[in-house]
């Protein structure tokens, strides 16, 4: 984990958006960074497409975690 220095004004915007979306300041900043990074890397993607992509990634990670937990439970038996 690193530290990113941002302006006080942007920090306040992140804080307000995070509160509205029930995210911590760090989680909101990370969300905006991911969205911005995907937008820059994929200029043809709409905001909705980016959110769908992030949702698909989250589902994939969730499935992988489930498989790992199931494997660990079998190993413990």
Image (tube, rainbow, N blue to C red):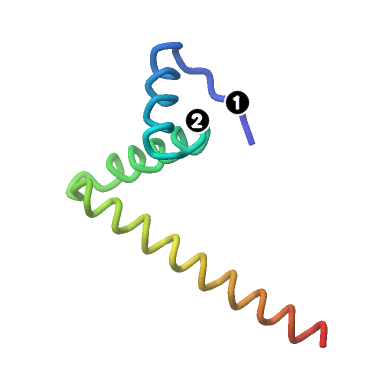
**Label 2 belongs to which residue?**
25
User: For the residue carrying disc 2, how many other residues have a C-alpha within 10 Å: few (<14), some (14-19), or many (20+)?
Assistant: some
Counting labels gives: 2
Q: Nearer the viewer, mark 2 or mark 1?
A: 2
Q: Tell which residue pokes out farthest to the top in this image.
A: 8
Q: Is residue 48 left or right of residue 66?
A: left
Q: Eyeballing the image, is 3 above or below 43?
A: above
Q: Is residue 17 above or below residue 55?
A: above
Residue 72, horizontal then vertical, whole percent: 74, 78
Q: Quadrant of residue 17?
A: top left
Res 68 label: none
Q: Quadrant of residue 31?
A: top left
Left or right: 71, with 65 as reference point: right
x then y, percent, for residue 32: 38, 36
Give the percent coordinates (x, y) of residue 25: 50, 30
Say the numbered circle drawn on residue 3.
Answer: 1
**Gap between marks 2 and 1, in whole Å?**
13 Å
**Closest to the observer: 10 or 12?**
12
x, y percent for residue 52? 29, 58
Q: Earlier in the sequence, mark 2 or mark 1?
A: 1
Residue at screen point 20% across, 50% down: 45
Between residue 31 and residue 13, name the one nearer to us: 13
Closest to the observer, 56 or 23: 23
Label 1 SS: loop
Residue closer to the observer: 44 or 59: 59
Residue at image coords 23%, 54%: 49
At x 30%, y 52%, the residue is: 51
Q: Residue at x 51, y 35 (%)?
A: 24
Q: Secondary structure at mark 2?
A: helix
Quadrant location of the C terminus? bottom right
Quarter of the image with the N terminus is top right
- Determine whether, in the image, residue 53 is placed left or right of residue 28: left
């Amino acid at each position: 984990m690193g530290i990113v220095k941002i302006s006080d004004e942007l920090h306040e915007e992140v804080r307000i958006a995070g509160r509205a979306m029930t995210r911590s300041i760090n989680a909101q900043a990370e969300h905006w960074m991911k969205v911005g990074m995907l937008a820059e890397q994929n200029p043809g993607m709409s905001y909705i497409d980016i959110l769908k992509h992030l949702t698909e990634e989250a589902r994939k990670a969730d499935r992988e975690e489930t498989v790992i937990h199931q494997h660990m439970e079998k190993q413990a038996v």
